[in-house]
Amino acid sequence: MSSVRTLFWFRRDLRLDDNAGLWRALEEARAREGTCACLFLFDRDILDHLEPDDRRIAWIHASLVELADKLAALGSRLLCLHGRAPESLTSLLDAFPEVRSLHCNHDQEAARLARDAAVEALCRKRSVALCSGKDATVLERDELLKADGTPYRVYTPFRNAWRARVASAAELLAPFPSLELARSHLAPARELPDSGLVSLEALGFRRTVAPVPTGETASLALWQRFLPGIAGYEEARDIPARDGTSSMGTALRFGTIPVRRLFRESLTQSVKWSDELIWREFHHSLLAHFPRTATRAFQEKFETLEWDDPESDPTARERLEAWQEGRTGFPAVDAPMRELAVQGTMPNRLRMVVASFLTKDLHLHWRHGERWFARHLMDYDMASNVGNWQWTAGTGADAQPWFRIFNPTSQGRRWDPAGHYLLRWCPELSGLPPARLHEPWSKEGLPPGLAYPRPIVDHARERSVTLERFARAAGSPLH
């Protein structure tokens, strides 16, 4: 008879060390005097909405290879499932009738919550407890509320309350000794089916070169390379030509490194960098408390805001496609959009520039940009993506006025004055002097043979249009 009494379902937590959910599952296995088996599900309800070249699936697959190897080194095995959650888990519970608990870490997105509700119903019929806990954030859901019991709607008070709470409760950042428990309470390989890790090709995806390291070991190494220079983060983070950011977004999204460790090692080293992590927690809180904001304006008055419609307006459609393909005629927009298409990454500062351009120069709804980022970003996380898009669009949780509008030309000149980043992705501009790189279409025109698109809009004019539209929606006349 199998000793497996507990299952742990890896989802957005692809690591063995300091894994809160795995630790709880192993503790449960020990309490039941049994063992814990680990599983990963390639969920068709997710995969069927992705393109075959989605580089994130290749990244996850490579990370799972390492995870499976680590489990094998501990004498156990990764159970790899492929299908839809209820059917796949039904078959697994049939194979392990002694299982009494299924553990996983929370996933806040609406579609994933619906999946978990179906899984919970299945578990209830089998007298199996579905145990879900937090791991992606330090504080979540109702753990941080205002004095009146309502959720925070503005970042700065949230940040201050978050820091005060963590300062008074050091255990919130304490590591979970999951790796130590794993050595003695993982199910032995002899009790588990040797199904092997399903190939990318069988999943319907192609192999791609990952722009960021895969797996737990490489994610930790990447963090350790960044940490000695973290004090210079505030200055370097906005310079796209410099490697001044941590590049930890993908590791955080898929849980190959614990957020608790990042906080433990950054809180006293860089206030600015740890503030960025708290900004992420803020957006997770917003999505949990205001799930409608995944598609609708956080500030409800801006539901009436006028947007151009690419479905019915050919000009709007052409402008959207130019933005997507990096041919707007604004180098500070085109360069990061081309980088996004090629490798799924984009510098921090320029994410705000391209988002502002789409919403406030092209007057296209932020949802078009959010969906495009969801398709291409390696570190795509719905809570952060929606929150940041709404913040830039002026419809989100923001204490600042809605008339923040980034000038793409001046932003490029300020943060990439010599054009080092720009020329990496817009090499056709290499024949221009640095003074003209960020505004190639000046009075003199382009040199013969230099092919670069003309600006698709006039920034000054579109800025005025945006201000008028927001003023109408806000009921705050400009004059």
Image: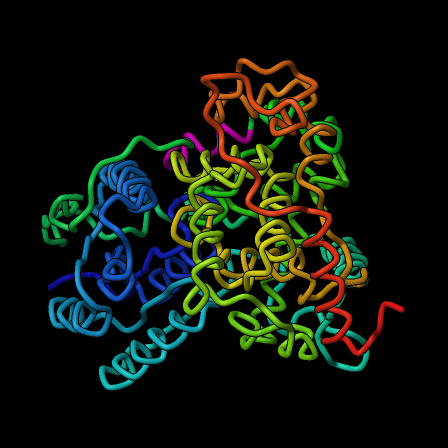
Q: Nearer the viewer, residue 325 or 4?
A: 325
Q: Is residue 440 above or below residue 25?
A: above
Q: How many discs mark residues in the rendered view?
A: 0
- Quarter of the picture containing the C terminus is bottom right
Q: Which color scheme did the rendering employ for the protein?
A: rainbow
Residue 232 lies, in percent from the top left, at: 73, 26
Quick check: 110 above or below 405? Answer: below
What range is drawn magenta here?
213-223
Which residue lies at the image location 70% right of the left edge and 61% below the top edge?
A: 466
| Nearer to me, 81 or 167 | 81
The quadrant of the image that shows the N terminus is: bottom left
Across and down, in percent, residue 33 comes to 30, 63
Asked whether residue 218 is drawn in magenta, I would say yes
Q: Is residue 92 left or right of residue 413?
A: left
Taking the magenta stretch, the answer to whether it contains residue 31 is no
Q: Residue furthest bottom?
A: 125
Residue 389 lies, in percent from the top left, at 59, 57
Q: Is residue 106 visible?
A: no
What residue is shown at x 36% (from left), y 60% (from top)?
A: 30
Residue 106 lies left or right of residue 304; in this view the side is left
Residue extending farthest to the right is 479
In this orientation, which residue lies closer to the viewer: 28 or 431? Answer: 431
Question: Does residue 366 sit above or below 347 in this rendering?
Answer: below
Q: Is residue 142 left or right of residue 470?
A: left
Residue in view at x 52 percent, y 43 percent:
249
Instruction: Mark yes or no: residue 308 visible.
Output: yes
User: Where on the picture, by quarter, is residue 282?
Assistant: bottom right
The spot of residue 261 in percent (x, y) is 58, 42
- Which image quadrant for residue 464? bottom right
Q: Main secondary structure of the magenta part?
A: helix
Q: For the point 59% across and 44% down, which residue is it?
A: 351
